[in-house]
Each structure stands twice: as C-alpha cells, then as structure tokens.
C-alpha cells in the first residue's frame, strides 16, 4: 500500500535505515514512512501518534501504532528497544526538546531528527525587514496558532547535541524540496535531518 | 434479520482442570458460527462475549427475540465480515445459555447450584480452547473481545500465544480494580439477600431471586454508562407524569429505565451464573498469573495486538488499556492502541461508532 511519494526528509531517513532493523517512528502521522520501511526494507516498525484519527488510519494499513504523547509516553519503552528512533518535524513542538532528545537516544541505538531551520534566510528576512514573526513556506502558521513552540536553528541543534554528548553521525539539508550541501546550511537550509547516536 | 438457530453443542472430552484445583467432567460448550470456514481453516475469528453476553453475537436471541448483541459489527459486509471470515462465538462456562454452568445438571442428576466450582477467566478460555481443538482450528485469524470478552482475549493471547494471529481487546482491563470488585460485590449481595435465592438452591422451586438479580443488573448498568450519556438520555425528566408523586414509584425516567433493564434481564439470565461470572472477573489479574509482571505474560508472543478504549468509560478507563500497552511494548510485541471519543461510557463498544468500525475492520483485514 506504499508508493506514495515521501516528504524529502522522510525519504532520506528511509534510505539510511538498515534493512530488517527495529524502528520507532514518533509522530508517525498516517504511517507513510512506516509503510515504506516495512515494504521496502522489511523493517519492524512501530509508531506513536497523538491524533486518534491518524492512529486509526495506521491500524487500517496494518501498522502497529500507539496513540500517545511523545512528551510523556516514550517512558513506556525499555532502553535500546529500537535500532532507530525517528522524530520528524516534531522536535520544535516538544515541551522540552532537550529531554525528548535524551529519550530518543535512550529507546533507540540511533536517532533521526528532522526539523525546520529557523535561521533560513527567508525567516531571517521576514524578521529583519518585516519586523514580524515569519510565516514562510517552511513555517506556514502564524505565531499564535503554530504548534512550533521551540523554534530551533541548525547551529542551535548542533549545540544541543554537543551539550547532550550526542554524536552527530550524518546530516542532510534541504531547500526547495531538494537536498543541498552542508556549506552555509544554517543560512540556506529550510529543513535539516540529523542522524545521531550516543 | 437473521433467524434464531439452536446452538451447536460441543462435548468437551475428558475432564476440564480448573484454576481452583477442581475438575469438571461432562462439560458442554454451546456455540454459534457465522460464515464459512476456509478449507485450510485460516479464516476463523473468535469473538468472546461479555459478562451477560452469549453466543448469539449476530443472530436473534432465542428468549428475547432481540437481534444479536453485536449485529452492527458482525455480518455480511460488516467490519467483521462473515462473507470472508467464519465467526465463532461460544457461551462461556459458568453461564446459562447452553454451556455448563451452575444451572446445569451435575453427574448426580441434580443442578450444580452452589456446588459448581468457582471458575476463572482462564477456565472459561480453557473451555473455548477445547472447543477450538474439537473444531480442528489450530490458529485463529483473530480473537476479539470487549469488556469481559477482552479479558478472555488477553488470557488466550497470554496462555495460548500460538492460537491467535491477531488479538483485539476493546474497553477491557488486565485486572479488576477495587472499584470494579466493589460494584460486583453490591450485585452479589443483592442476589444473596433475596430470600428466593435460598442459598443458591432455587432451581425447580416456584421462586427465583429475580428481585435480587434485577437490583444487581441495575447497579451494574449504571457503571456501563457515562454521566454525560445518562444526563443526555434522561436528565431529570419525569416518567409518564407531570409532577412528582411524593412516593417511591419510578417518578424519574432514569428510574423507570433501570427497573425495565433489571426486570428484562431476569427473563434471560440465571442469578447463580451472575455470581459465578462476576467472581471470575474479580479474580482476574493477568500479571498475578505470570509472576506479578504483566509484560511476562506476553514474552515471546508473535501475535499482533490492538487495544481500544473510550474516553468516557470509567469502568475500564483508558489508563487500564495503556497499562496493557506498556506491558506489550516491554515484551516487544506488535501493538496498536487508540482511545476513541464516544459519549456513552463503557457501553460504547456495543453502540454506533464509525471510528470503532474503522479500527476493527482495518485491524482484522
């Protein structure tokens, strides 16, 4: 039932997960990444999703997804229960992104984290010249309604990883739906994906 | 509309060893099937019924004439599609719709009554597994149960893990809480306080403890509904009168409703069965059976699990389902869980709810 086109950050993650590994997809939505991993790589994928309607959709696709809140319910999983813990486009919505990163690296041997880069030049320009909280392609919701309560930049995330003694194994950057190089990523990237371990 | 059919009866060979240490011989299991079993027997779906349920899941009840208790879920084209699956539903032992229970005749030709051994949820499942053996079904496509049916479903998954590929548990729990036991004790005391109960030996006499059984049902029925549901359905509206009577008639609609539920129940249910089955539920603690750690009940399972709870169910609230999910995660089992929003409390699993249909259909696929 896969075959749908994955978002670029999910496609990168899907390409770098080892076949037949165990994966927890946190904030798995309708299960697009999980379905791809199960069909293309025979991965044993589990998901966590807050929205009961999306959980229902995942169950109907034959996926194993638990309705839960990543802020509190990751505690239900044993240490190193997974080869990979994946957190896509969710870090910036966490109550405490630093503690969530700890939890990712506790339940997973490795973690993938993707997020919109608040230091992208478009965001900077909106603040600098418009004097308003940016509403851009990557951050389409106004400040009062956005779920993104902890905006983060590529450099901020690198600092957090250092503070948490998490090793950044790889990083990928995206602008205009395509992958770009790492040079000047904090200016040029709309989205970033990091692969980490500890 | 299906027509009532006399249940099939399966004779359990030999004796059934029970958790209490006692044994039962000559056990009979009454069951219904819907749909056709595939040649390779790969499409069997077992449905486990709740406390006062029975095997008539999708056919008319032979006593009340009412439609099957889960006809909206089970049938041709329904979420549990009998065009694709053979659905099996058996009356649990201890009950009174054809399977061996306290009203059945003991080997001495007299009804068991209080001589019937106290049974457990696992004993009920032992009876069902014996039936599956008799039907030659080694592995169920799915086992499905709500409420007490969910307890049997969990018990089967934990104790006979190779018998079911998919395990669907709706509005249930892995153990009875103090509050659950307390409500059941109210019901049992109501039955045993009825003089007609006569120590359980009322079979063959003119009187039966209908008053006590009706009160037990009324108390239990309240626990199946939400406050919101009761308020929406009845509020403080009066029953067939324009003013309060200043007496103890059923002035309020909710009183009239409960009396009707209570007395209707006595037409189709045996008071001793109610004692035995509520006891089995109170004794249920799946972790206790497995050394005190619920995760150990599921170690090594290859079944896929799905748990569903309802946000207004205060009998077996969402936290109980989450507790099971936690244990299944710890055991590395494949598990899905969803809390559905529904206004009608514990009874939501029996009522119209499109989201539930979607989850059940999707999981059973």
Image: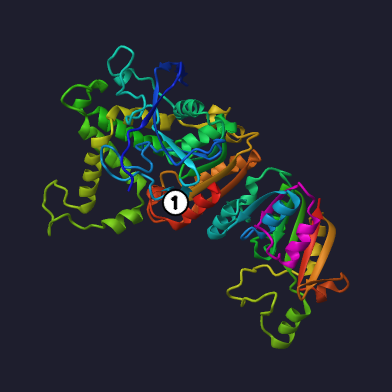
Q: Give the range drawn in magenta.
A: A1-27
Q: Residue at x 80, y 56 (%)?
A: A16
Q: How many labels does the image show?
A: 1
Image: B37 above or below A136: above
Residue B142 lies, with reference to residue B231, above or below; the image says: above
Dividing the picture into quadrants, the one containing residue B205 is: top left
Question: Which residue ends up furthest to the bottom in the rendered image?
Answer: A129
Q: Position of residue B176 (x, y in %)?
A: 45, 36
Q: Where does label 1 land, which residue?
A: B78
Coloring scheme of the render?
rainbow
Q: Position of residue B70 (x, y in %)?
A: 39, 46
The stretch drawn in magenta includes residue A18:
yes
Q: Looking at the picture, does residue A55 appear above or below residue B132?
A: below
Residue A68, visible in the rendered structure: no
Q: Does the magenta stretch include residue A20?
A: yes
Residue at position x 30%, y 11% in the image: B108
- Check disc 1 and report its element: helix, strand or loop: loop
Which residue extends farthest front? B39
Q: Which quarter of the rendering shows the N terminus of chain A?
A: bottom right
Q: What x and y, as percent, mark residue A118?
A: 74, 73
Residue extending farthest right? A183
| Residue depicted at x 46% and y 29% | B128
Identify the residue shown where x is 32% and y is 31%.
Answer: B97
């Amino acid at each position: 039932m896969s075959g749908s086109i994955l978002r670029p950050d999910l496609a990168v993650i899907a390409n770098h997960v080892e076949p037949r590994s165990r994966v927890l997809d946190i904030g798995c939505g309708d299960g697009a990444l999980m379905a791809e991993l199960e069909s293309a790589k025979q991965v044993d994928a589990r998901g966590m999703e807050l929205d009961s309607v999306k959980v229902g959709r995942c169950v109907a696709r034959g996926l194993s997804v638990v309705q839960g809140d990543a802020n509190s319910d990751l505690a239900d999983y044993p240490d190193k229960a997974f080869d990979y813990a994946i957190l896509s486009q969710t870090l910036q919505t966490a109550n405490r992104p630093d503690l969530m990163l700890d939890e990712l690296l506790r339940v997973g041997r490795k973690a993938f984290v993707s997020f919109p880069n608040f230091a992208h030049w478009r965001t900077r320009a909106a603040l600098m010249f418009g004097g308003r909280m940016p509403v851009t392609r990557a951050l389409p919701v106004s400040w009062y309604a956005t779920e993104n309560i902890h905006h983060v930049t590529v450099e901020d995330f690198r600092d957090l990883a250092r503070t948490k003694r998490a090793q950044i194994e790889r990083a990928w950057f995206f602008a205009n739906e395509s992958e770009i190089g790492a040079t000047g990523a904090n200016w040029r990237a709309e989205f970033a994906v990091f692969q980490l371990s500890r | 509309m299906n027509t009532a059919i006399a249940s099939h009866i399966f004779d359990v060979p030999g004796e059934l060893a029970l958790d209490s240490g006692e044994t039962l011989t000559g056990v009979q299991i009454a069951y219904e099937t819907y749909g056709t079993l595939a040649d390779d027997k790969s499409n069997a779906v077992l449905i486990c019924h709740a406390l006062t349920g029975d095997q008539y899941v999708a056919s008319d009840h032979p006593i009340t004439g009412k439609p099957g208790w889960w006809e909206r879920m089970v049938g041709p084209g329904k979420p549990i599609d009998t065009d694709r699956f053979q659905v099996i539903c058996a009356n649990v032992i201890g009950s009174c719709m054809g399977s061996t229970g306290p009203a059945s005749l003991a080997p001495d030709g007299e009804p068991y009554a209080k001589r019937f051994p106290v049974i457990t949820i696992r004993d009920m499942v032992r009876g069902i597994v014996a039936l599956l053996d008799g039907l030659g079904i080694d592995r169920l496509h799915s086992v499905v149960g709500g409420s007490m049916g969910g307890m049997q479903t969990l018990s089967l998954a934990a104790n006979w893990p190779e018998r079911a590929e998919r395990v669907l548990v709706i509005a249930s729990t892995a153990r009875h809480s103090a509050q659950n036991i307390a409500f059941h004790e109210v019901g049992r005391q109501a039955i045993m306080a009825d003089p007609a109960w006569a120590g359980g030996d009322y079979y063959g006499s003119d009187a039966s403890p209908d008053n006590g059984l009706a009160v037990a049902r009324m108390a239990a029925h309240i626990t199946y509904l939400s406050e919101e549901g009761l308020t929406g359905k009845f509020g403080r509206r009066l029953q067939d009168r324009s003013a309060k009577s200043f007496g103890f008639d059923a002035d309020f609609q909710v009183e009239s409703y409960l009396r009707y539920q209570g007395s209707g129940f006595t037409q189709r249910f045996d008071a001793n069965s109610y004692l035995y089955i509520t006891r089995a539920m109170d004794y249920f603690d799946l972790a206790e059976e497995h050394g005190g750690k619920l995760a150990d009940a599921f170690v090594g399972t290859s079944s896929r699990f799905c748990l569903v709870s309802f946000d207004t169910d205060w009998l077996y609230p969402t936290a109980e389902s989450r507790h099971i999910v936690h244990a299944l995660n710890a055991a590395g089992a494949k598990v899905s869980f969803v809390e559905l929003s529904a206004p009608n409390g514990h009874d939501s699993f029996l009522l119209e709810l499109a989201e539930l249909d979607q989850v059940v259909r999707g999981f059973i696929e």
